[in-house]
Amino acid sequence: MENLITTFPEIEIKEHEPLAHYTNTKTGGPADWLAFPVDVAQVQQLVDYCHQTGLALTVIGNASNLIVRDGGIEGLVMILTRMQTVKVEGTMVTAAAGASYIEVTKIARDHSLTGLEFAAGIPGSIGGAIFMNAGAYGGETKTVVDHVTVMERDGQIHQLSNEEMDFGYRHSAVQASGAIVLDATFALKLGDQNAITAQMENLNARRAAKQPLELPSCGSVFKRPTGYFAGKLIHDAGLQGYTSGGAQVSTKHAGFIVNVNHGTATDYLNVIHHVQETVQEKFGVQLETEVRIIGRQS
Ligand code: FAD
C-alpha cells in the first residue's frame, strides 16, 4: 500500500494511530491511517483517492457515539474535528462538520438565537449530530436543520434539504448513503438571550445530576425501545454496576457504560452483550444499540 503521509504531504496523517486517543470511551484499536483534513479541499483529495484506489474510508467526528473494536479500522479514517468554521447570517447558522455542537449552541445564544438550547450538552460534532439526528430533552436536530451539504463517496458535493435528510429517531439519510456531512445550516429564531442562557444552564444542570459525565462513556448505549426506557429496563434487571474488565454499567445512569479501569472495546462489547441477553431474558425486550460499533475484530 502507498504511504499516505508522502502522498498527501500537506495533510496531517498518522499511521497506525490508536483511536483510543480520540474516542470518548478511551478505547479502540488503531486506524491504519488517520487523517486530519482542515477544509473541504483536503477532504475532497482524500475522498477522491479512496474512490480511485478502493481504499476503505471511515469518517468520524468527536467519537462520542462510537465504539471502535480493539482490532482498529482498516484503511483511512478521516477525523473532521479541525473543520470548525461557524457563520451566522441573520437567523441562519452554518457550521462545518467538525464544529462542536456545544460551541455552536453557545454561538447561537451569543446572537440571541433560539432553537438549539436542547443540544447545549451534546458532546458531538455537527457531522455526528446530523448523522445521528442527535436529540435531548424533547428537542431533536431535525427540527432546526434547514439544509446539509454532503460529499458523496465519489466526491460529488451537493445540498440536501431537511426533507431529503429523512431524519428519524437517531436516523438520517446519510447512514445508508455513506455521504460525508460537510456542513449544516440551522434555521433559528430571534429570542431572549437571558431565557436562552437560563434554559441551557437548566438542561446542563439536569444532565450533570443524572449522567456520569466525570467518567469516559459513549452516552446512552441503547436506543429507546418502543414503549419502554432502556435505562429503566437495565436498572430493573439489576444490572447497574455489572462490570467486565474495565467497562461497567454506570451506577449513576443505567443507560451508560463507563470506563472505570482501563477498559477495552472488547470489555464494552461484553457488557453490551450481557445487558442485551439479560434484558431479553427477563423482559422479552430486544435492546438495539444507539452507539455505532465499527472496526475489525481483534
Ligand atoms: P462520532 O461518534 O464521531 O460518529 C458517530 C457516527 O456518525 C459514526 O457512524 C460516524 O461515522 C458518523 N459521522 C460522524 N461525523 C460524520 C460526518 N461528518 N459525515 C458523515 N458521518 C459522520 N446523543 C444524543 O443524541 N443526545 C444526548 O443527549 C447525548 N448525550 C451524550 C452524553 C455523553 C456524555 C456522551 C459521551 C454522548 C452523548 N450523546 C448524545 C451521543 C453523541 O454525543 C451524539 O450521538 C453525537 O451527535 C455524536 O457526534 P460525534 O461527532 O461524536 O460522532
Image (cartoon, grey):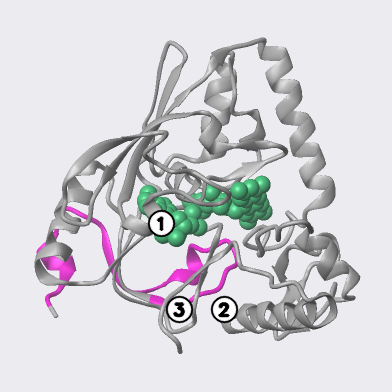
Residue 234 image-quadrant placement: bottom right
> Where does residue 297 sit, x and y in percent of width and height?
45, 87
- The amino acid marked with disc number 3 is Gly
Task: Give me the C-alpha separation between circle 2 and circle 1.
Answer: 22 Å
Which residue appears at 73% of the width and 16% of the height? 195
**Label 3 or label 1, whichever comes before in sequence order:** 3
* Circle 3/circle 2 CB separation < 8 Å: yes
Q: Nearer the viewer, mark 2 or mark 1?
A: 1
Residue 29: image tag: 3
What stretch of residues is rendered in magenta?
2-30
- Would the CB of label 2 be found within 8 Å of ligand 1? no
Name the residue nearer the viewer: 116 or 81: 116
Left or right of 174 in this view: 137? right
Left or right of 185 in this view: 217? right
Residue that numbered label 1 is attached to: 175
Residue that numbered label 2 is attached to: 265
Image: 87 above or below 65? above
- Would the CB of label 1 be found within 8 Å of ligand 1? yes
> Where does residue 3 sit, x and y in percent of width and height?
15, 74
Name the residue nearer the viewer: 18 or 120: 120
**Label 2 or label 1, whichever comes before in sequence order:** 1
Tell me if residue 23 is in the magenta stretch.
yes
Name the element at disc 3.
loop
> Where does residue 226 sit, x and y in percent of width and height?
71, 57
